[in-house]
Each structure stands twice: as C-alpha cells, then as structure tokens.
C-alpha cells in the first residue's frame, strides 16, 4: 500500500447541510462602530495631548522662572552697586539715589524700596496692581548698611497663561480634526461590515442570491468571502431540500398510489383478491415502508456516536454477514457480487450493527448503479492502522461536478439511475453510511470513478 494514493486525501467525504430560516430583525443595540472608533481615537489623542501639555508646561515654567529670576537678580545687583558708598544722610546724594531708583521703578514696572540700616523706609517708588503675583528681590547696599528691595510682577505667569491657553486651543482643534478624520476613515472601514449585514438580512428574508462585497483591506475581503461561502452553502442546501422534497414526494406517492389503486380495484371487484394481487399490494407497501425506514435510519445515523456499542470483531465474518443479507437484492437486480478472500486476522473495533448497515448501503448503491449481469467486487486489505474495504461497481461513473456532493443527504446525480430505471434510491443511503462510519472512527471516499465503474474506499480502525 506504500505506493498507492490515500483516497481520503483526495476527496472529502463530508458535505454540510443547512436550511434557510427567515427571522425577524432584532433590535439593533449599541452605538455605530464608526462613531465609537472616532470617539475612542479622539479620546486617545486628547489624553496624549494633555499629558504632553502638562510636561511642556512644567518644563517651560521651570525654565522661565530660572531665566527671569536670574535676569532680575542681575539687574538689582547692578543698581545696588551703582548706589554703593553713597552717603544716604546727604540730601544731595540722596536726591541722586531717588532719581536712579525712580527710573528703575518705571523701567521694571515694579515697587522699589530703600530701607535704612534701622529699618526705616528711605525711598518708596512705584505701585503694583492688587492681586498681581509678585516676586521680591533684595540686595544689601555696600558701605551704608541699607537694603534695596524690589517687588516685580511675575511676568512668566502671564506668559504661561497665554502659552497654556494656546496649548489648550491647539489641542482641542487637533482633537476635533483627528475626530473628523477618524470618523471618515471609520466610515470607510465599516462600509464592508454594513454590506455584509445588509446581505445577511437579505439572506435571512429568503433572498438566496444575496452576496456581500469586500473592501480595500484584506480582513473585510476575508469576511465577505466567508459570508459568500456560507450563503452559497445555504443556497445549495435549500436547493437540495427542495429537490429532496420533490423526490421524496415522488418516492412516497408512487408506491402509495399503486397500493391504493390495487386495493381499490380489489374492493370494486375489478381484479380478484387473489394471491397475485395481494403480492403486488404488499410490494407497493414494502416500497413505501422502505422509504420511510430509510428516513428513520438517517435520523438514527446522525446520533449513532451516542448509541454505538463497539466490540472487537472479525472483519471477514462481518463481511460474510453483510453479503448474506444483501444477496437477495443483488439477485433481484440481476447483479453478481464477489468478495475477495481476506486475511482472517483482520479484526476491527466497531459497532457491528452500525458498520454492517453502512456496508450494506454501499453495496446496495453498487447494485443499483450496475447493469444486469454485471459484477460488484469487494476487496479487503490492511493499510496501516486501518482495514481498507474497496467496493467497485460496474456503473456509469460519477460526473466531476457531482463527486463532491454524493455524500450529501438527498443528493442524487443525473447518473444515479439503476439499469435504465427512472429513479433509484432515496438519495440518503451514502449519507447514512458516512454518518455511521464516522461514528465508529471510520471514513469513506471515492477512490476512483470512470465509465467502467466507481470504487468506494472504506476505512475501519483495526483493533489493538
């Protein structure tokens, strides 16, 4: 088996089913995503600007305070040096000092005081507006024992006020601009989401052709592609459901009509109520119950994993039981079945009832697809941790467009007509087989198909 391709790697055995359900539109809660994105981005920008503004304010305030304090200190030192050594008791000298200090008060727009050695106020020039934040600088006068004191307004405070206001206005304008830009960008980003939502609403209201379009980004295209793939599956499931309803109606109506006509004819005396007529009525009833039985089997198969009772059994014995059960159908179809000799040591750990039913369904499908006097071949071999059962029919093969759907419930390809009959099977036999095998850790796939027949490969887990 090392040189053979694994059929399960080439063909998927699954096919999901779904249905279209029309639901009422629920109340839309929450704010629009675009608005939320814009608000969040604006809040983030505003927070960053506030932190940056506080940091800049602290740096500028400290720098200005140091620079202004140094400048004022240098100025008062120069003034104190200019009047150093002056005799403050001499009227003429004192007049010169007053002239200098008045000019200083006017220039600095501050409050200048000259305080004598005894603490008496010798000179007092200039006034400051009430409530103005001031800075007091003092410098001793060399030689006279007096002290020069100057109170000046904190010019840096006014500057910082203007500076902070400018920062605030600039920050608000920047936040507003960022918010508007974010709103526009968010609107463009969420446009594909609105398109998907609109398509979903259309799909929910029964428009199975509804499709979504993506946007310029990869994520929105992925979302649209995922939705479109889902919508395509829903559309296909609905198509299969409608076709299945039509097929099942036909499959149920035909034997029901035959049965009703046969019984009515016997009641009316048109035909005698002999064994032949009763056999025909029984055959019609059997066909009717067969369809109903398969529907019940499908329901059971979907919950098989919870009902399974696994046990280690001989695969050869299991195939022999299946062959004995299926031989009457093959004889009725005029088809022969040949099971190749298999190693007696092959033992599998499965539910024999469920796997036996799955094998019978696959063999029944092979018999229905094969013409009269044809032969269905069954081969068994070990393949790694699996026992591989191959069932090869002599039917017309499976078209490529049907290959991916043959395990879907109710799916019947145009070629699925046994020996020229108008219809063959209910379209759920292979679905039941797939579900039962999957519940037991097995799998099924089409290994080969062509004009000379189709080979199904069934993998079962070996025991131990």
Image: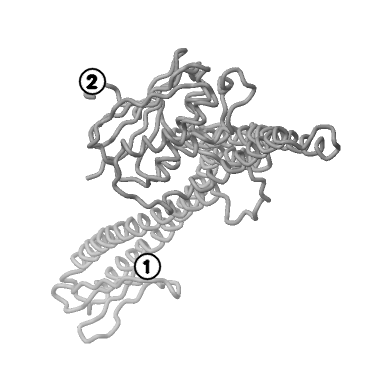
Residue 224 vertical placement versus 77 (above, below): above
Q: Nearer the viewer, residue 17 or 462?
A: 462
Helix, strand or loop status at disc 2: loop
Name the residue rendered at 39%, 33% in the picture: 444
Q: Percent position (x, y) of residue 283?
A: 65, 35
Name the residue rendered at 17%, 69% in the picture: 84
Observer able to see residue 242 = no
Cα separation between marks 1 and 2: 98 Å
Q: Nearer the viewer, residue 154 or 42?
A: 42
Q: Percent position (x, y) of residue 49?
A: 40, 53
Residue 199 position by quadrant: top right
Question: Which of disc 2 and disc 1 is earlier in sequence?
Answer: 2
For the C terminus, the quadrant is: top left
Observer able to see residue 197 = yes
Helix, strand or loop status at disc 1: strand
Find residue 124 and name its label. Answer: none
Residue at the top extreme, as displayed:
451
Query: Left of 45 or right of it: where is 382?
Result: left
Residue at the left extreme, as displayed:
143
Residue 115 position by quadrant: bottom left
Name the residue rendered at 66%, 33% in the picture: 251
Residue denoted by label 2: 3
Give the foreground label among 1 and 2.
2
For the N terminus, the quadrant is: top left
Query: Left of 93 or right of it: where is 230?
Result: right
Q: Percent position (x, y) of residue 81?
A: 18, 65
Residue 23 vertical placement versus 413 (above, below): below
Q: Nearer the viewer, residue 74 or 57?
A: 57
Q: Residues within 10 Å of mark 2 (few under 14, many from 20)?
A: few
Q: Nearer the viewer, residue 185 or 459?
A: 459
Query: Left of 332 or right of it: where is 337?
Result: left
Find residue 153 and name its label. Answer: 1
């Amino acid at each position: 088996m090392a040189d053979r391709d694994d059929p399960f790697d080439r063909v998927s055995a699954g096919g999901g089913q779904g249905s279209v359900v029309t639901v009422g539109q629920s109340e839309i809660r929450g704010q629009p995503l675009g608005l939320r994105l814009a608000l969040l981005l604006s809040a983030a920008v505003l927070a960053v600007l506030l932190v940056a503004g506080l940091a800049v304010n602290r740096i500028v305030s400290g720098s200005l305070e140091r620079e202004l304090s140094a400048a004022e200190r240098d100025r008062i030192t120069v003034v104190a040096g200019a009047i150093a050594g002056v005799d403050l008791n001499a009227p003429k000298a004192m007049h010169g000092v007053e002239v200098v200090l008045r000019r200083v008060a006017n220039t600095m727009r501050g409050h200048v005081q000259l305080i004598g050695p005894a603490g008496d106020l010798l000179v007092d020039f200039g006034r400051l507006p009430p409530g103005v934040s001031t800075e007091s600088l003092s410098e001793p006068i060399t030689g006279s024992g007096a002290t020069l004191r100057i109170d000046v307004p904190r010019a840096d405070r006014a500057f910082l006020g203007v500076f902070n206001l400018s920062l605030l206005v600039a920050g608000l304008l920047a936040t507003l601009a960022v918010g508007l830009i974010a709103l526009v960008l968010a609107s463009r980003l969420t446009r594909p989401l609105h398109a998907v939502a609109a398509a979903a609403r259309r799909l929910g209201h029964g428009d199975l052709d509804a499709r979504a379009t993506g946007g310029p980004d990869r994520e929105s295209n992925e979302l649209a592609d995922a939705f479109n793939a889902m919508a395509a599956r829903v559309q296909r499931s609905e198509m299969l459901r409608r076709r299945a309803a039509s097929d099942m109606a036909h499959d149920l109506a035909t034997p029901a009509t035959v049965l009703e006509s046969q019984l009515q004819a016997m009641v009316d005396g048109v035909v005698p109520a002999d064994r032949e007529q009763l056999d025909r009525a029984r055959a019609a009833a059997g066909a009717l119950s067969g369809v109903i039985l398969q529907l019940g089997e499908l329901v059971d198969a979907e919950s098989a994993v919870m009902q399974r009772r696994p046990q280690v059994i001989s695969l050869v014995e299991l195939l022999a039981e299946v062959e004995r059960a299926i031989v009457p159908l093959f004889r009725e179809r005029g088809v022969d079945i040949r099971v190749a000799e298999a190693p007696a040591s092959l033992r599998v750990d499965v539910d024999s009832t469920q796997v036996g039913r799955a094998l019978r369904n696959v063999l029944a499908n092979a018999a229905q697809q094969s013409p009269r006097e044809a032969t269905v071949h069954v081969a068994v071999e070990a393949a790694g941790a699996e026992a591989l059962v191959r069932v090869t029919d002599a039917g017309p093969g499976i078209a490529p467009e049907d290959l991916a759907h043959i395990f879907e419930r109710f799916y019947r390809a145009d070629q699925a007509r046994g020996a020229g009959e108008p219809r063959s099977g209910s379209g759920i036999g292979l679905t039941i087989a797939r579900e039962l095998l999957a519940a037991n850790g097995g799998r099924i796939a089409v290994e080969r198909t062509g004009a000379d027949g189709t080979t199904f490969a069934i993998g079962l887990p070996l025991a131990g």
